[in-house]
Image: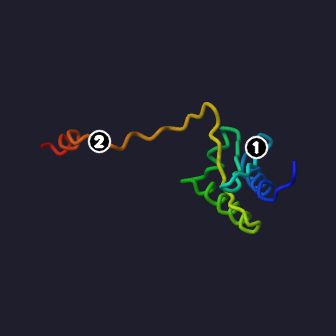
Protein backbone atom coordinates (compact mmCIF):
# COMPACT_ATOMS: atom_id res chain seq x y z
CA UNK A 1 0.00 0.00 0.00
CA UNK A 2 1.25 3.47 -0.84
CA UNK A 3 2.18 5.87 1.92
CA UNK A 4 -0.32 8.66 2.48
CA UNK A 5 0.61 11.47 4.85
CA UNK A 6 -2.96 12.06 6.00
CA UNK A 7 -3.62 8.43 6.95
CA UNK A 8 -0.24 8.00 8.63
CA UNK A 9 -0.67 11.24 10.57
CA UNK A 10 -4.12 10.28 11.87
CA UNK A 11 -2.92 6.80 12.78
CA UNK A 12 0.08 8.20 14.67
CA UNK A 13 -2.03 10.69 16.66
CA UNK A 14 -4.67 8.10 17.59
CA UNK A 15 -2.10 5.50 18.64
CA UNK A 16 -0.62 8.08 21.01
CA UNK A 17 -4.04 8.74 22.61
CA UNK A 18 -5.46 5.23 23.16
CA UNK A 19 -4.44 2.58 25.69
CA UNK A 20 -4.36 -0.26 23.14
CA UNK A 21 -2.51 1.15 20.10
CA UNK A 22 -1.99 -2.29 18.55
CA UNK A 23 -5.77 -2.55 18.01
CA UNK A 24 -6.05 0.70 16.03
CA UNK A 25 -7.16 0.23 12.41
CA UNK A 26 -7.05 3.17 10.01
CA UNK A 27 -8.25 2.87 6.42
CA UNK A 28 -8.24 5.46 3.64
CA UNK A 29 -10.78 5.67 0.82
CA UNK A 30 -10.94 8.17 -2.03
CA UNK A 31 -14.11 9.06 -3.94
CA UNK A 32 -15.63 12.08 -5.69
CA UNK A 33 -16.30 13.73 -2.29
CA UNK A 34 -12.63 13.58 -1.25
CA UNK A 35 -10.67 11.41 1.15
CA UNK A 36 -12.39 9.44 3.90
CA UNK A 37 -10.28 8.14 6.75
CA UNK A 38 -12.04 5.52 8.87
CA UNK A 39 -10.80 4.69 12.34
CA UNK A 40 -11.57 1.62 14.44
CA UNK A 41 -10.31 1.27 18.01
CA UNK A 42 -10.89 -1.06 20.93
CA UNK A 43 -14.31 -0.36 22.49
CA UNK A 44 -12.61 0.55 25.78
CA UNK A 45 -10.67 3.32 23.99
CA UNK A 46 -13.69 5.02 22.40
CA UNK A 47 -14.05 7.49 25.28
CA UNK A 48 -10.40 8.50 25.01
CA UNK A 49 -10.66 8.94 21.26
CA UNK A 50 -13.84 10.99 21.33
CA UNK A 51 -13.00 13.03 24.43
CA UNK A 52 -15.24 15.16 26.59
CA UNK A 53 -18.11 16.49 24.46
CA UNK A 54 -16.26 15.26 21.36
CA UNK A 55 -13.39 17.69 21.77
CA UNK A 56 -10.60 15.22 20.98
CA UNK A 57 -12.34 13.86 17.89
CA UNK A 58 -13.03 17.40 16.69
CA UNK A 59 -9.37 18.35 17.13
CA UNK A 60 -8.20 15.28 15.17
CA UNK A 61 -10.68 16.10 12.38
CA UNK A 62 -9.39 19.67 12.22
CA UNK A 63 -5.78 18.50 11.99
CA UNK A 64 -6.66 15.95 9.29
CA UNK A 65 -8.36 18.70 7.25
CA UNK A 66 -5.26 20.88 7.56
CA UNK A 67 -3.08 18.04 6.26
CA UNK A 68 -5.57 17.58 3.41
CA UNK A 69 -5.49 21.27 2.49
CA UNK A 70 -1.72 21.09 2.16
CA UNK A 71 -2.25 18.30 -0.39
CA UNK A 72 -5.25 19.94 -2.11
CA UNK A 73 -7.65 17.28 -0.84
CA UNK A 74 -10.79 17.35 1.28
CA UNK A 75 -10.20 14.97 4.19
CA UNK A 76 -12.95 13.66 6.45
CA UNK A 77 -12.57 11.44 9.50
CA UNK A 78 -15.10 8.79 10.51
CA UNK A 79 -14.85 7.00 13.83
CA UNK A 80 -16.47 3.59 13.44
CA UNK A 81 -18.54 2.53 16.42
CA UNK A 82 -17.53 -0.97 17.53
CA UNK A 83 -19.91 -3.95 17.45
CA UNK A 84 -21.89 -4.39 20.66
CA UNK A 85 -21.46 -0.80 21.72
CA UNK A 86 -23.27 0.12 24.92
CA UNK A 87 -23.60 3.78 24.04
CA UNK A 88 -26.78 5.18 25.56
CA UNK A 89 -29.39 6.33 23.10
CA UNK A 90 -30.93 9.73 23.56
CA UNK A 91 -34.57 9.86 24.57
CA UNK A 92 -37.11 11.09 22.06
CA UNK A 93 -37.36 14.88 22.26
CA UNK A 94 -40.75 15.34 20.63
CA UNK A 95 -43.84 15.43 22.80
CA UNK A 96 -47.55 15.45 22.09
CA UNK A 97 -49.60 18.57 22.73
CA UNK A 98 -51.63 16.64 25.32
CA UNK A 99 -48.46 15.84 27.30
CA UNK A 100 -47.40 19.48 27.34
CA UNK A 101 -50.86 20.65 28.40
CA UNK A 102 -51.04 18.05 31.18
CA UNK A 103 -47.61 19.16 32.44
CA UNK A 104 -48.96 22.71 32.66
CA UNK A 105 -51.89 21.51 34.75
CA UNK A 106 -54.56 22.76 32.39
Residue at image position (65%, 46%) is 79
Q: Position of residue 7 (x, y in %)?
A: 77, 54
Q: Which mark is in front, 1 or 2?
A: 2
Apparent side of residue 90 relative to residue 65 in the rendered image (left or right)? left
Give residue 93's quadrant in the image.
top left
Answer above or below: position of 79 versus 34. above
Give residue 65's quadrant in the image.
bottom right
- Secondary structure, mark 1, is loop
Residue at image position (44%, 41%) is 90
Q: Nearer the viewer, residue 76 or 48?
A: 76
Q: Which residue, given by chain and number where applicable, does mark 1 sit on?
A: 24
The extreme bottom residue here reads 70
How is the model colour-coded?
rainbow
Q: Position of residue 27 (x, y in %)?
A: 76, 46
Mark 1 surroundings: few (<14), some (14-19) or many (≥20) residues within 10 A: some
Q: Earlier in the sequence, mark 1 or mark 2?
A: 1
The extreme front residue here reads 32
Q: Position of residue 6 (x, y in %)?
A: 77, 58
- Secondary structure, mark 2, is loop
Give residue 9's quadrant in the image.
bottom right
Q: Which residue, given by chain and number where applicable, does mark 2 sit on?
A: 95
The C terminus lies in quadrant:
top left
Residue at image position (70%, 39%) is 42
Q: Nearer the viewer, residue 71 or 13?
A: 71
The extreme left residue here reads 106
Q: Nearer the viewer, residue 78 or 87?
A: 78
Which label is found at residue 69? none
Residue at image position (78%, 45%) is 21
Distance of mark 1 from mark 2, alpha carbons?
41 Å
Mark 2 surroundings: few (<14), some (14-19) or many (≥20) residues within 10 A: few
Apparent side of residue 57 relative to residue 28 in the rendered image (left or right)? left
Answer above or below: position of 46 versus 71. above
Amino acid sequence: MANFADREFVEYIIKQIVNKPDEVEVTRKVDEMGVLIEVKVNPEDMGLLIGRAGSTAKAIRTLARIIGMRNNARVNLRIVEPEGSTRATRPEKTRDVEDVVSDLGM
